[in-house]
Amino acid sequence: MMKTTVLGSGRWASFLAWYMDRIGSETMLWGRPGSKTLSELRDKRRNEYLALPEGTGLTDDLGQALSFGEIVLVAISAQHLRELCRSIKAFSGKTMLLCMKGLERDSGLRLTQVVRQELGAGFQLAVWAGPGHPQDFVRGIPNCMVIDSEDKNLSRELADTLSGPQIRFYYGEDLIGTEIGAASKNVVGIAAGMLDGLRCGSLKGVLMARGAREVSRLVGAMGGNEITVYGLCHLGDYEATLFSPHSQNRRFGECIISGEHYGRLAEGVSTAHSLMRLSERYKVELPICAAVSATVAGQTNPQTALTDLFARISKYEFY
């Protein structure tokens, strides 16, 4: 039997443990000591999204968790990845699958770059991206996702191994495009939520067309394949991110308009900041990302940011 370790205890991490049990893997889930989400899972064997299978192990001992699985699924905040990597250097030789979307805030580095900086070649490394919410999966609603890596054989092996009745995995061949596309769709999701808050949802069509185009230009400038953005990592994830009531980034954008406090992680906030660094570094204009970045930083009000954004979009910019 395959053995899997899941690092993280939040919404997506708990789903990963649930899913791996469904495809026949023995699984252990780790949460940091003192974690409220881990405590809830220990006390109730469930959270607001799902009930954990009885066979899933739970621990706050990182060494115990990493000793358990051959495949390590990582689902934590992108901004805590570097710190985690520094804690697991002794556990080389495993396959690490990053099941998270984001960029390191101040450096703008892709998450695989962060791992390689800290861990070198000690782990086989891949990313899991694409559309889907735990709330839908546990109701039996299927979806398709993508696994990508610098090692094509690893991508294919993981895609074949992890595919099941609820998720069909495709393998990617453009790690840069997959990571940038997956991270940036959360920023577009915040913009979509702002439109919802302003009751301007009819503009989401323009947002989708322009968003994919500006991100594709960035991917191309970084050495990736522009076409990747139009696949599952980005455009294919728009329904789940820009429209779904379960989208945390879309909901965060709505709360910007309403003035409500949104107390959950919206990874697009940090990603917007990172993308402005990449925009400057690679000399690529990112108007949507810039509007979101300025808004969440309090540099402009959202209505002004969106009005200016859609006023500047011309036919030329779609090509």
Image (cartoon, helix red, strand yellow):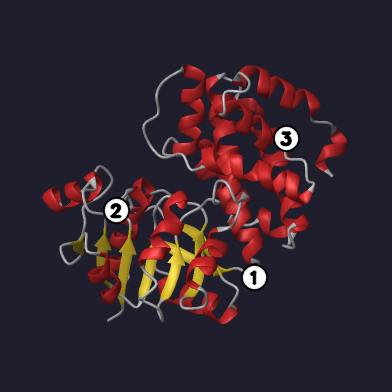
Residues packed near mark 1 inside 10 Å, few (<14), some (14 to 19) or many (20 plus) = some
The residue indicated by pointer 2 is 9
The answer for how far apart the CA atoms under marks 2 and 3 are is 35 Å
Mark 1 or mark 3, earlier in chain: 1
Side of 116 relative to 263 (left or right): right
Question: What is the three-letter code of the residue carrying label 2?
Answer: Ser
Residue 58 location, x and y as percent? 19, 61
Residues packed near mark 2 inside 10 Å, few (<14), some (14 to 19) or many (20 plus) = many
Q: Residue at x 33, y 56 (%)?
A: 8
Question: What is the three-letter code of the residue carrying label 3?
Answer: Pro
Q: Are marks 2 and 1 in contact (CB under 8 Å)?
A: no
Q: Are marks 2 and 3 in contact (CB under 8 Å)?
A: no
Side of 70 relative to 314 (left or right): left
The residue indicated by pointer 3 is 287
Q: Are marks 1 and 3 in contact (CB under 8 Å)?
A: no
Residue 68 location, x and y as percent? 26, 75
Q: Secondary structure at mark 3?
A: helix
The residue mark sitting in front, 1 or 3, is 3
Side of 191 relative to 45 (left or right): right
Quarter placement of the C terminus: top right
Q: Is residue 91 visible?
A: yes
The answer for how far apart the CA atoms under marks 1 and 3 are is 28 Å
Side of 287 relative to 62 (left or right): right
Q: Nearer the viewer, residue 11 or 236?
A: 11
Q: Is residue 238 visible?
A: no
Judge whether 104 appears above or below 191 on screen: below
Q: On the image, which quarter does residue 19 sit in?
A: bottom left
The answer for how far apart the CA atoms under marks 2 and 1 are is 30 Å
Q: Residue at x 52, y 21 (%)?
A: 197
The residue indicated by pointer 1 is 173
